[in-house]
Image (cartoon, grey):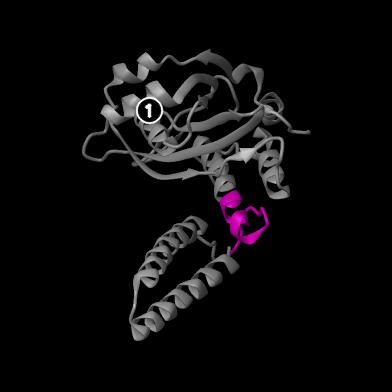
Amino acid sequence: MDIHNLESFLDSLQVPASCQLNKPVYKKMFLDMGALDATDKVCLKDDVSKIRWLYTLKPGTINIPVYKDSIREYEEVAILLVELSNHTRIKRIAGFMQRSIPYPLVLIFANNIEGNDLLCFSLSDKRINQADKEKWVIEDTVFTDWISLQEQSNEESDFLQSLSINNLSFKNFWEFYKSFTERVIAINCAVHSGLFMLENAEKAEPVDRLVKLKELERLEVKKAELANKLKKEKQMGRQIHLNTEIKQIKDQMSAIKGSL
């Protein structure tokens, strides 16, 4: 299916009509839940234009079983569309939305710039708080870069096509959510490798790609810090030392990118 705007992307997901909700979520709901601090409230007011609860996937609407163990309860999955007027604080917005809604959430952020539809996807693993079973602990939040629906790369096109619900695991809701998350991780790896490739679950030693992506982020920050020090450094010996450190980091990063 050709994806060229928001409507065609949503069609490409092929979510059954039984799961479609397509109802507005009012900002007041987030304010009433009490999970927002002062900055969150500013982001909600100034940066969020509209929120729609697109789909609710649960055993009554789709043939996917509930998943429960001692640390997770994945009884349903909600997919929300969040239209932004300003996307600079998207991570904070995703954070308070994930804290506020007690379901596994797929957040689809949309921003339209000069008629160009841009999408960003965010998911967060939620675990039961062992100290308070009524609360969630949010771990391993992942984001894609912004993807232009009018100007997709080959890798981005493959990623978007892979999100059709029929490509995801129906084993249970935890596996369903993980299969969506794996695709977000895969497109983030493709930024470095140039290839959108889902991991082979049958590998004897599965690679933890998310750990490698986080290490790349850490090394990128460290490299930038050393480059700033190098600009200010006057002593030749210290310049040589900093250049050596930067080269070592670049070599580490190249090795990680090669293994993605």
**In the visual, does 180 lie left or right of 40?**
right
SS type, badge 1: helix
Q: Residue furthest right?
A: 1
State the image coordinates of residue 94 (x, y, percent, origin top left). Answer: 42, 34
Q: Please tell me which residue is depicted at 62% across the width and 17% down the height of the picture.
A: 18
Say above or below: 131 vs 25: below
State the image coordinates of residue 2 (x, y, percent, origin top left). Answer: 78, 33
Q: Nearer the viewer, residue 233 or 158?
A: 233
Quadrant where the image shows the C terminus: bottom right
Q: Nearer the viewer, residue 46 or 41?
A: 46
Q: Residue furthest left?
A: 131
Q: Is residue 65 visible?
A: no
Q: Badge 1 local density, few (<14 within 10 Å), some, or many (20+)?
A: many
Quadrant where the image shows the N terminus: top right
Q: Which residue is mark 1?
A: 43
The residues colored magenta run: 186-203
Q: Nearer the viewer, residue 220 or 229?
A: 229
Amino acid on which disc 1 is placed: Cys
**In the visual, does 79 lie left or right of 72?**
right
Q: Nearer the viewer, residue 193 or 127?
A: 193
User: Quarter of the image holding residue 238?
Assistant: bottom left
State the image coordinates of residue 165 (x, y, percent, origin top left). Answer: 65, 33
Image mark count: 1
Q: Please tell me which residue is depicted at 50% across the width and 32% down the height of the picture.
A: 107
